[in-house]
Amino acid sequence: MRTIVVLCCAVMFASSVAQADADTKWHGQVAGGGDFGLAPEVVGFGWVLFQATRADIARDADLRLYYNTDTVEVGLDRLSFGKNFEFSVALRAEFIFAGLLRYYYQQGKRVDGLGFNASYVVLLPKIQWHAGDHHTLELLTNVRYWFFGSNNTDPTYLLPRNSWVFEPRLGYIYWNVTSPSEEWGADRLFPRIEGVAVGAWIGVDVRSNITPWGLPDGRNDPSKGILTINQWLKAGWRFGDRFRLELGDTANWGEGQDDITRMRVAGMNPYVVVVPGLPWSAILSERLFVAQVSGNVRVKKNKPQELGLLISGGTVNDPFRVGDLKQFGGIGGVAITTDLRWGIWQVYARVGYAFPANWMVDNPYFAMMAGLGVNAF
């Protein structure tokens, strides 16, 4: 209910900004939603976001103001300099709920007393070189400060220490997507992809403090230099007037990681590696491969409303969350989806079921997600 109230207030604020400043190049979107586990226990929470962008303030760059639940960000995107080079920079802060470390899941169930508050402030500089048609190389030199606090955390659970982190990343992107630019607005929770996009990056995290934390099982004993290699795919094709197919995958390999840096897996919202049926971010894994396929059908010819079926599955390491990083377990689920659009409004709903696995307890697992987006001005 609180998410709905905040979303309505954000829509009214965005509309007033648009009316007061209609002749500017500002554009804004508002969205919100919730992702909830329904069985074997009721868990979950929601989000609400607002984004305003001022186009072309200097050298084709956009100024971006962003708020999402516990996160605020100010960014300058795609400042052109030299031939085929762009520079972006953002300052972001996230409070209390960062990494969803406030909620601790083991074998699919929430465990009280092992979650804690996590917050950070991070500077995000990025240089991109558009080396040719569809090909981009990028260098990121993020600098982050983490700080932590208790959330009725069990006294025997050792909290991580506050620390600075240097996070350089080197990446490559192949982008051959023909979807209209509107698909990448903040109000579009799930863009309809037509074309192919592939990316890969390698990076390290170098912390000022690397003391072990958590339970005494070795799972959270990070290295001085945390290594991550990541690959992702997003692809989609339209067949005729009614059917659309999408494919995607996420692959990740980490060395020396901990639960601060591991990828968030499970849930049906845009902020995780999607696996239907399981609670939001029920799994934290650094060695994984998860693929998904979805088929989407327009309810009426030449109308934007779609119904779909999504299947996702793969493997993750340490599924029991006991510090055995060499053990792998299967994960997967299926969801019925809707993507309904009327003018500037989008409504999303997903109902999912997780396939049984030997590492899960208290099957079956069902979950649902609902969201709303509006291109406010």
Image: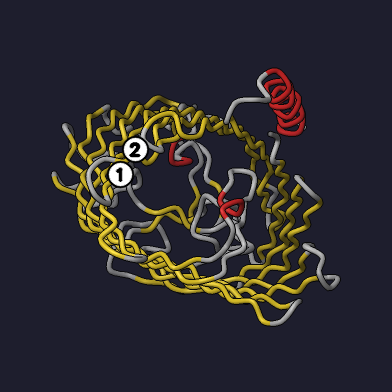
Image location (x, y in percent) of residue 252: 33, 63
Residue at left 15%, top 47%? Answer: 225
The reply to whether residue 317 is visible in this rendering is: no
Image location (x, y in percent) of residue 265: 48, 57
Side of 21 relative to 167 (left or right): right
Proximity of marks 2 and 1: CB atoms separated by less than 8 Å: yes
User: Mark 2 or mark 1: which comes first in sequence?
Assistant: 2
Q: Residue furthest top?
A: 20
Query: In the structure shown, which secondary structural element does the residue marked by tag 2 occupy?
Result: strand
Residue at left 73%, top 68%? Answer: 336
Amino acid marked by disc 1: Glu
Side of 143 relative to 191 (left or right): left
Image location (x, y in percent) of residue 270: 56, 52
Side of 288 relative to 207 (left or right): right
Q: Which residue is mark 1?
A: 86
Image location (x, y in percent) of residue 144: 28, 32
Q: Between residues 212 and 278, which one lies in front from this camera angle?
A: 278
Q: Which residue is mark 2?
A: 79
Q: Answer few, some or many: residues within 10 Å of disc 2's Cα (few below 14, many 20 plus, some between 14 and 19).
A: many
